[in-house]
Amino acid sequence: EVMKDVSGLSDMESQLASELNVQQAIIVSGNSDRYSWVKKEMGRACVRQMKEQLEPQDVVAVAGGTTLAAVAEMMSPDDNVSSVSFVPARGGLGEKVEIQSNTISSTMAQKAHGNYRLLHVPDQLSDETRESLVLEPGIKELLHLIRQAKMVIHGVGEAETMAARRKTKAETLESLKDKQAVAEAFGYYFDRTGCIVHKENTIGLQLDDLSSNQVVMTVAGGASKAEAITAYMKYRPSDVLITDEGAAQAMLRK
Ligand code: G3H
């Protein structure tokens, strides 16, 4: 805390929280676009919040991405997290296995000495497959757990970057461009006013069933994500935003 006051980060945290309407903003020094250790610092800050806010037996739903992978890497055992169940927030989104939410929830659980459940769902589902998958008893049970999650933790990406990384169909790319998508989170794409303009066809957490008693923690940094984070927060301001100085400065400058 002393360090933060010296560098003015705590002033920036309250400015950012009020600007974005989030309950709490946490800013770590640096810009993760430039240095990868900054992502790990966001991970460390996220783990600290989890240990403060979680209680034994809670369910935590986690999304995918390199930032969430950094959170998982920084996890360690603790009374409050060692009986937590980690579940992926949504099914496959076309990411590499290392940064899929299944991998991240199992890594988090192993490092926390907690439990995990996997959601095995192929990427790019047809409506028909999706409708029959959700009726499978094992999947049904897992979807129920996901909906009960006390905490939901996710990253935010730039729409174009995410669509390219996931080898999105040309047709979808075109429509994201037409609709001026700037942000992505959980496989949902948003324009700069925070409206959903596209949703990947997978199962699991549906953003509109998030309730106000769930703690939503967003972890996203790097100046390049400033516009994306701002747009996403217009859709639904999170309870906690963990970001870095690079993104925070860019968001406050606008
Ligand atoms: O779902 C992925 C996020 O939107 C962003 O991914 O943490 O690798 O930038 P990232």
Image (cartoon, grey):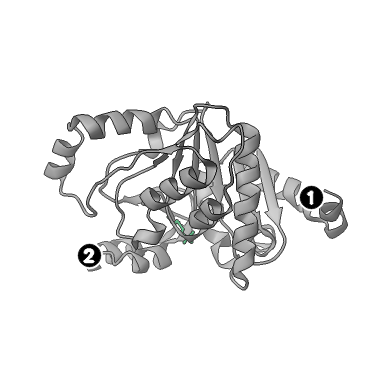
Q: Is residue 188 visible in the rendered structure shown here?
A: no
Relative height, residue 22 to residue 98 (above, below): above
Secondary element at tag 1: helix
Closer to the eye: label 2 or 1: 1
Kindly indicate the quadrant of the structure image that contains residue 165.
bottom left
Q: Which mark is residue 228?
A: none
Q: Is mark 2 within 8 Å of ligand 1?
A: no
Question: Residue under circle 2?
Answer: 171
Badge 1: few (under 14), some or many (20 or more) residues near its Cα, within 10 Å?
some
**Residue 232 vs residue 66, the one in the foreground:** 66
Residue under the point 50% across and 28% down: 58
Secondary element at tag 2: helix
Residue under the point 40% across and 49% down: 186
Residue type, numbered disc 2 = Glu
Quadrant the C terminus occupies: bottom right
Question: Residue under circle 1?
Answer: 10
Tell me residue 68's x, y (percent).
50, 53
Relative height, residue 132 to residue 110 (above, below): above
Relative height, residue 136 to residue 199 (above, below): above
Q: How many marks?
A: 2
